[in-house]
Every structure is written in C-alpha cells, then in structure tokens.
Amino acid sequence: MLFLISKRVLVAFATVLVVIVLSGLLIHVVPGDPVTAMMAQSVSATPEVMAEMRARLGLDLPVWQQVMLYLTHVLQGDLGTTIRGNEPVLRLLMQRVPNTFALAVSGLGLALAIGIPLGFLAAVNRGRMVDTVVMFIAVLGVSIPAFWLGLIMIQVFALKLHWLPVAGSNWRNILLPALTLGLTYCALVARMTRSALVDVLEEDYIRTARAKGLREHEVLLVHALRPALISIVTVVGLVFAYLLGGQVIVENVFSWNGIGRLAVQAMLERDYPMIQGFIVVFATSVVIVSMLIDILYSFLDPRMRQK
Amino acid sequence: MSISTEISLRRRGLPLGVLLGLGLAIFIIAAALLSNYLAPFDPTRMAAGPRLAAPSSAHWFGTDEFGRDLFSRVLVGGRLSLGIGIFAVVSGLVIGGLMGLIAAFSGRAVEAVLLRLIDVLYSFPDTLIALALVAFLGPGIENATLAIAISLVPFYARVTYGLAAAERAKPYIEAARLAGIRTGRLVRVHVMPNIGQSLIVMGTLGFSSAILSAAGLSFLGLGVQPPSPEWGAILASGRNYINKAPWILIFPGVAICVTVLSFNLIGDSLRDLVDPRRKGRP
Amino acid sequence: MNSPYLSVRNLCVSFPAISGGFRAIDDISFDLARGEILALVGESGSGKSMTSLSIMKLLPAVAQMSGRIEIEGQDISAFGRRQMEDVRGARIGMIFQEPMTSLNPVLTIARQMTEGLVRHNGVSMREALATASTWLEDVGIPEPARVLAQYPHQLSGGMRQRIMIAAALALRPGILIADEPTTALDVTVQSQVLDLLVDLKARSGSGILLITHDIGVVAETADRVAVMRGGRILEIGTVDEVLRSPKHDYTKALLASHLTVDKGLKQRAFELEEARP
C-alpha cells in the first residue's frame, strides 16, 4: 500500500514537472518579442527596464537553458512577478486559491448530487422512457456552455427575480456560480453514472442477489450502487479537471475572485509570467486532487486494500 | 444475457438520436453555407435598425447595441464557428492521429515517452489548453483556430493510439508482419481503414468541443475579434445589456447549444454502434 | 413416494423479437421431489440453463414464457415480482457456474451470507451470523469466523462455490437449482463439491436440479436424468434406465463420446506403461 501511494506521488510530481516545462516553453510561442508585447501598455517601459526583464526571464539564453531557468525558479517557489504591479505571482495566486477551491468543490458537490441520482434513474430504467428522457437531458447539458448558463442564471435569478446578488465572492454569492457549474457538469456525471451502473447490473453477482430473493431495492442500492459508486470515484478526478477548466470562464461571468478570473485578466493584459504561474498552479491543483482521489479509490475497493 | 441486449438494440431501430442530430446538423450546415444569401442585412452594418430593438418581423432576432441585425449576425456567426470547427478538427485529427500512430508503431521507448506526454496533456480540459495557447499567440481568429486545433491533439492522439494498439494485437497484423510487410505500408493499408470508422465518430465529438472552445475564447475577447459576429463574441457584448435586450443573450446561446447538441447526438449514437466494447449495448 | 416439490408442465420460452421468433424452450415437463437429484444434461444451447432461469423467473424482460410451474402444488407462473421475491431463495435456491464472478466483490462474505437470512427469516444479524458460521463449517470451510470477515477475491474458486452452496442452503429451500456448479472449477475440486452437494442433500432433504453438460457427473451423482436438446426433453428417467438403455440416438451419442474419452485415457496410460523399460 505504501508502495502504491509513493508511486502515485512520483507520477504526480513527474506530471507537474512536465507541465512546468511546457509552461516555460510557452513564452516562445509569442510571435515577436514577448517583452515588447508584455510591456506594450506599460508606462514605465524604457529600454533598460525591458532589457532587465528579458534577462530575468532568460529570453536571451538558448531555449533549453531558459526553460531550465524557469524550472529551477518554480521549484524554489518563485513564479515570477506580474507586469502590472511587480508583485510576486505566487502570492497573488495563492490568495485566490481558496476562493476557487470553494467554488469548485461546491460545484462538484452539486454536480454529483444531481448527476448520480439521475444516472441511477436512467440505468435502472434502461431502455424505457425515463432513460431516454434523462439521457437526452444529459446530452443537452453537455452541449450548453457553462458561461452562457451562468449569464442566463444571472438574468433570471439575480436581475429579474432579485433573489440573489450578482457579484462578489463570499458565502452568500456562491450559490449562483456553484449552481451554474453543478448544472453544467451534472450531465457528464449522469452519463458516467449510468454507464457504470449498466455495467454493474450485467454482472453475475446481481443475478445471484436476485436469486436469493432479495427485494429489488436492496439489489439496486446495495449490490449495484456500491460497486458502481466505487468505479465512479475513478472518474470524479476527470470531472473535477473539466469543471475547473469551465470555472475559469464562469469566474469571469460572476466576477468571482478566484485564480480563473485573475488568469483571464492576465491573458487580456499579456501578463505572461502571471499566465505561466496560473498554468502551474492549475495543473498542480488538478494533479493533487486526482492523486488524492486515486488513493481514496484504493481504500474504497476491497480488492485494492491489501498488498 | 447476450440475447436480450441484441434484441434491445434492434427494437429501437436506428436511434432517434442519429435522426434528430443529423437533421439538425444538416439544417445548421445549410444555413451556415448559405448565410451570405440568407442574411437580410450585412452583419457588421450598424444602424440597420433601431438600437436594441426587440425581435420583430423586420428583425427576427432583434438588434444589438449598435443597431446591427442580430439574425444576420447569428447566421454569419454560424459560418465562422463551423469553419473554425472543421479546420481545428481536421488539423487536430491529422496531427494527433499521426502522434497516436507513431506511438503505437514505433519502438517501446518512443511509445513510453510519447504516451506519457499524451496522457499528461489529455488530463487537462481542452478549452483551457486553447486558452493558454491563445494567451501567448495573441487574439484573433487564426490564432484561436490554431490554438483549438492543438488543444484537440492530445484527445485525438490518445484515441488513435488506443485504436491502433488494439488493432496491433490482432492476428492479421501479426500475419502481415511475418509476411514481411513494412510498418509504413502496414499502417497505411491495413490499420487505417479499420480504425477510420471510429476516428470519424471521434471527429464529430471533437467538433462539438471545438465550437464550445471557440465560443468561450471569443466570449473572453481572446478569440474572434469584433466586429466579427462569432457567437461567443456576440454574447460578450450582449452581456452589458442583459436587462434591456435579453434577446442578444438568448439567440446566439441557443445557436451554440443546438449546434453542439446536434453533433453530440450524432457522435454519441455513432459511437454506440462503432465502439466494440459497447457494441450491442444501448 | 413423495409428491413432487417442483412440477413443470408444458414450459415454453420464446423470444418473439428475434427474427422468426426463437423458441429457446419448447414444451418441456418434469417433476422434482424433495431429496432427489434430477440432472438436466445437454450441450450448450440446449436450453438447460434457460430452464433454471425460467423457473426462477430471472429471464430477460423480452422473453415470453408459458406453461405451468408449481411449487408444493401452488402455481407460481402468474406470480408478480414481489411474490417471486418471496419464492426465490426461501423456496427455491440457486447456485451458478462462475464462483469467481457470482459473488459481489465489494461486500464481505458475512454480508452476502446473512442478507438472505435476514430478509426471509427476519432474524437478527447476530443470529444470522451464527447460522452462517455453522453452515460454513458444514460445507467444510475451516475458521468460519475469519472467512466471514473476508472478501471474495481473497478466497479460491472452490471455497467460493462452497460459500455459495452454504448461503443457498442456509435458507432451507425445498429445492436447489445448481447450474453447472463444477464446470469452472479445477478437476480435483469438482468431485469434492459434487460429494458435498450429495451429502448436503441427504442431510437437508432438499431436492437438487443439477444442470450439467458432463454425463460423467450425471452418472456419479444423479438419481434421475433428463436429456435436453434444442429446447426439448428427449428422454427422462432414472439414471440406470437412461444410461444403460438409452432410447434416443442423441443420448447414445452423448454416452459414446464420454466413454471414448475414458477409454482413450486408459489406452494411453497403458501405452505409456509399456514404453518404460
């Protein structure tokens, strides 16, 4: 078991390294001189300042050296400073990480709370009207852009009905963006739940349970749902990654003060160090969450518990 | 219990999903291709009607804050989206497919490294990859299309690898190898036709993804630039007029949903028929 | 002479949706009394497994069933789901071919053994565990307490099959349907499990409907035998009658193929013996 966990950690770490390298490389994607592009709107853009920035970012060095430089900086916790106010990127991001996580977790919670029962309903009534309806709703859900749903939600709930406030990042304001994310991604969860349950319901042990004369609800809720949920856990990590990706735009729609909103602002301002920093933080978050979920799965599935 | 599943599939006939999806898709593609003829107004022409006018017989979808006809804008926006989608999917499929095939048919070392790389990228949402790329490439429709194409590469690479690896294990490939057929020809003549079907299915699903990414990018101001009427861009400008002119929000959004929905329906139904693991399972 | 516990009359199972309408079981009838073992023998596709599933009403929804099935004189063919849930397990038990996949991998053995008892007999968990423990001993599993706490993947195929048998018989059904119970097991374990079944039958008084494709098993274990082919019963009678004087060509062919294998093995052993200096 310990071996398994350390293997996971190693893989996670390697993944983050790859992302850092890719992030470091991205600055070379910029057509033309990155520093010029970055400082285009800055008042204090003198040639000396620009040269200094170029040196700091290692842009005069050969590519691989620049990437190594970036890598060593990041591993030491230095994600650079923003163009805007010369503040350390890491600090700015970390300030907002709790907000992003709060929203992400709420959104994921809602997505699971709505999606799993829907998927269950569809799987149990497979082939019948309920199944078709639920699955159609799910396909529809997957086709709706999260940010558009967010705008509609604002329109309906905040502006027309004056039920909920529009912007801000505290506990009262989390409902609408969380609901937006939850409703968007519950479709994905519903599809995966249905798929997992349909697989389980075809297993021999379900037939055994029925042959014992157990009541159908016990067969479904105990013998079918439990193994299905365990296999759904493996997919939750994926859903989380997608949700977090959609959240980047949703934070913008709701002016939610998280790293997504910060990142988009940086993108519009060509604040490359900030964008790179965001990529690293985002990737690290996703990787850590996936790893934790993997480990959780090892504990939940009795077949994995030993060894 | 194979008998029951076989019956279920037949009983449903051709899935309703394919018919609905196909119907919608044809309608949308036709509208997009003919957009220049169907649009009553020039989508960029300001003051074609009163500003922020509600939908009427003169302006089916109403007008926006500059008095531009929304119906024309949505129509032409469709052509933009579909164009971006097709280009991105084809490029992504070609590059990603190549990567996947290389990974499957080269030596162990290449396979291991490439696969790791693909897996790392695959675990991140494609919209975000596109966003990150556009952030550095700069805004604009060409950059956005390129970014979206690259964002689809990990997906297509992984899918192609999976399919190719499955084919690789089959006896007929082994037989061909023993007969002395070289890898290049093997892949081209034997493997490709067999996985081609599945790849087409994946093409439709990637298409939906591409359109959503395009809309997202343009919404944030990083994709198609105004005054081009990409759906996401229209939503961005409509955002300020949510209260006064909700139709600016509604119509482009519905257009996105319907388009993505139609391709998802087609892709889903096709996948059920093509995926060997799910064959015969509704 | 016992009156039959299970009585099947004119059972037909068809699948109308398959082109032409496919008849999996075509008008079969037989009886099974308590304390006797009736073997249903035939090749795959003969309909023998489907017979057992029909009795338990575990067929897929698209199947159409007609005929009479009586348990202790009571006609269950018209029973709805809730009524069948009372019949299954408590009055008719069933064990399956694949012990590896027939037990739920995420539930403990304790859970899977006691749930039937709690459900049908309304006993408390403690009582159920005690009963389960005793039954595990009866089927020859050492250290029942330890096994109860384990999960299926920690046990061998033979042990799992014994557990399935124990779980089924603990509910004291009048008859037990055993669908190819030894086919997926190692040869050495096969005879152990068969002996176990015969032994338990004698002790509990349950009848056993033994589904198998192996005529050797029939000869060893069964009291009566029915030969199935293409959804029909070709002949039915005591093992003695059918195996010594088979009426049908098919039965003769079945017997011949078994004996050939047997004879062939004996011949090779003889040759090997000769080859040694």
Image (cartoon, rainbow, N blue to C red):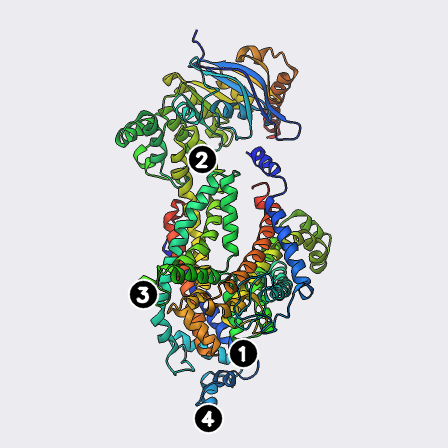
Residue C93 screen position, x and y as percent: 42, 24
Query: Label 2 marks which chain's residue?
Result: A
**Circles 3 and 2 on the same chain:** yes
User: Whole-Å distance between the Cαs marked 4 and 3?
Assistant: 42 Å
Residue picked out by circle 4: A48
Relative to the observer, which residue lies in front, B200 or A73? B200
Badge 2 is on which residue?
Answer: A206
- Between C97 and C106, the one nearer to me in the picture: C106
Q: Mark 3 belongs to which amino acid?
A: Asn
- Contact? badges 1 and 2 (CB < 8 Å): no
Chain for mark 3? A
Measure the alpha-carbon separation of dots 3 and 1: 38 Å
Q: Nearer the viewer, mark 3 or mark 1?
A: 3
Q: CA distance from mark 1 to mark 2?
A: 56 Å
Co-location on one chain, circles 1 and 2: yes
Dot 4 surroundings within 10 Å: few (below 14), some, or many (20 or more)? few
Dot 1 or dot 2: first in sequence order is 1
Mark 1 crowdedness (10 Å alpha carbons): few <14, some 14-19, many ≥20: some
Residue A283 placed where, x, y %? 44, 66
Instruction: Say which residue label 3 marks.
Output: A170
Q: Percent position (x, y) of residue B138?
A: 54, 76
